[in-house]
Image: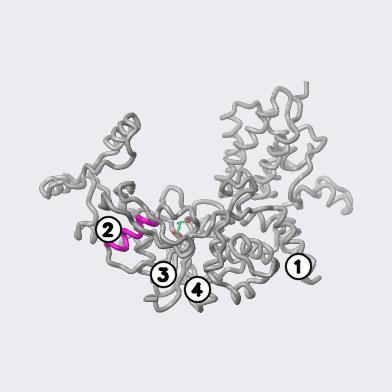
Amino acid sequence: MAFDQVRVRLAPSPTGDPHVGTGYIALFNFVFARKNKGKLILRIEDTDQVRSRASSEQMIMESLRWLGLDWDEGPDVGGAFGPYRQSERRHLHQEHANKLVTSGHAYRCFCTSERLDEMRAKQKADGSQLGYDRHCRNLSDAAISANLSASKPFVVRMKMPTDGVTIVKDLLRGNVEFENQRIDDQVLLKSDGYPTYHLANVVDDHLMKISHVIRAEEWVSSTPKHVLLYEAFGWEQPTFVHMPLLRNTDKSKISKRKNPVSLRYYQRAGILPEAMVNFLALMGWSFGNDIEIFTVSEMIEKFELERINLGGPIFDQTKLNWMNNQYMQKISTGRFVEYLRDQIFNIDQLLKIKPFAVERMDRFDQFLDNNIFFFNGALKYDGIPLVPAGKTNDEMITMLGRLAETLDEVYDWSMDPIKQAMDAVKTELNWKPKDYFMPIRLVVTGRKDSPPLVESIEIIGREMTRFRLRDAADYLKAHPQKTPS
Ligand code: GLU
């Protein structure tokens, strides 16, 4: 191996919740790095200015720490190959895009978005191959100079070969061939000077001396573009390893409509981190001898990349619960008490609940009964009429789905943004307040007489609120309720 050390990276885009898939890929990178006395680098891929969020970066780091998967270099711990946030490396990406323009591997494209829209519409109408028609690929020097003098905005596109094949060597999949003529002249640098994923990813992997790229299967189709970039720069490629995608029980790609996907949800739901890590390990790897329960250290000891198994791993909640129970049976009393104290009855939560709790009880023995929904996970909806008069079961399901989706985007989990999101859905679906708020209250608290709704939602928290909305929608799909007359 020409790389003198194993250096792997986890490169999440901070655009949402910390995904179980990120935990899964992090685990395999972590184990491989530790096995080979190498380094794990955390690089934040925040070049999508519109969707990237500092709060998401923070949550990703917290969830990885919760899982015990720590990194050797990263935005918070530093390192010799920083900065570790791509947005702070723009000068490097621009410099490398310019190098490719100079060496003839890339070109400036001055096409306006109107022209590109027309081109696309025409391609669709003709049924021809979609993609950039390479209009600017062979502009004369004079035309380029004129455009530059006129300060016309441009992107930098990669000059892809028009025939032959590009071979991606994947450690697990062997050689995967891609026909070059189907690869678009990819944008490398946008007109605002920000790089696209392909350029930033390759330039940073190279500059950070990444020896192995271990990432999810969904990136396989991007890899020929990366291989061509390595070739254009004259750089050595890392070893590519594409892990099988996590799937829902119906084998579709894991999605939040069918499974909670946020690591924070599982933390809130009382899954022990060691159980989660063990479960994620089984998604792509087997310990051998039918052993299912093992620690990360045991995994590191026995780990070989070659033994990763490519069958579509199913993210099965029942199995996860079983696994968690195995760990719970073994935890010490000290940890058991600590867990309940820190995770379930934690002081911040109790402080928020207190003003509402004292209004609604005269004795402490009523506390749990009155406030159980602040601590519980899934609620039971049997016998609770969730669908309001004048609305159908389907309308209620749609509303719950839209509200969950809208709340997915509320990162600042405080009363005003929560209220705005709720009002937005009410307006969008044109529901009357009297039909709208009570069913939501029943879904998120399980009772009619909870403390004020928005306050309750704030305390129940982002993960559990969204979970209950989706869970209630599933409940109504399975147990349709007649509209009360
Ligand atoms: N930023 C990409 C992601 O969010 C990184 C993919 C890769 O590892 O190359 O998953």
Q: Nearer the viewer, residue 250 or 288?
A: 288
Label number found at residue 378: none
Please say if the residues under marks 2 and 1 sit with CB atoms less than 8 Å apart: no
Residue 115 higher or lower than 79, as above or below: above
Disc 4 residue type?
A: Asp
Kindly report the distance in space between the C-alpha atoms of the residues bearing marks 2 and 3. 20 Å
> How are the residues colored?
one colour
Kindly report the distance in space between the C-alpha atoms of the residues bearing marks 1 and 4. 29 Å
Kindly report the distance in space between the C-alpha atoms of the residues bearing marks 4 and 3. 13 Å
SS state under label 2:
helix
Kindly report the distance in space between the C-alpha atoms of the residues bearing marks 2 and 1. 53 Å
Mark 4, residue position? 72
Q: Residues within 10 Å of mark 2 (few under 14, many from 20)?
A: many
Mark 3 and ligand 1: say if the CB distance to the nearest ligand atom is below 8 Å.
Answer: no
Disc 2 residue type?
A: Ala
Please say if the residues under marks 1 and 4 sit with CB atoms less than 8 Å apart: no
Which tag, 2 or 3, sits closer to the chain's start? 2
Residue at 54% x, 75% y: name it. Answer: 34
Which tag, 2 or 4, sits closer to the chain's start? 4
Residue at 39% x, 65% y: name it. Answer: 205
Q: Residue furthest left?
A: 142
Mark 3, residue position? 210
Disc 3 residue type?
A: Ile
Measured as percent of width and height from the top left, residue 158 is found at: 28, 53
Label number found at residue 338: 1
Disc 1 residue type?
A: Glu
Q: Nearer the viewer, residue 107 or 83?
A: 107
Magenta segment, which residues? 223-232
Mark 2, residue position? 97
Q: Residues within 10 Å of mark 1 (few under 14, many from 20)?
A: some
SS state under label 4:
loop
Kindly report the distance in space between the C-alpha atoms of the residues bearing marks 1 and 3. 39 Å
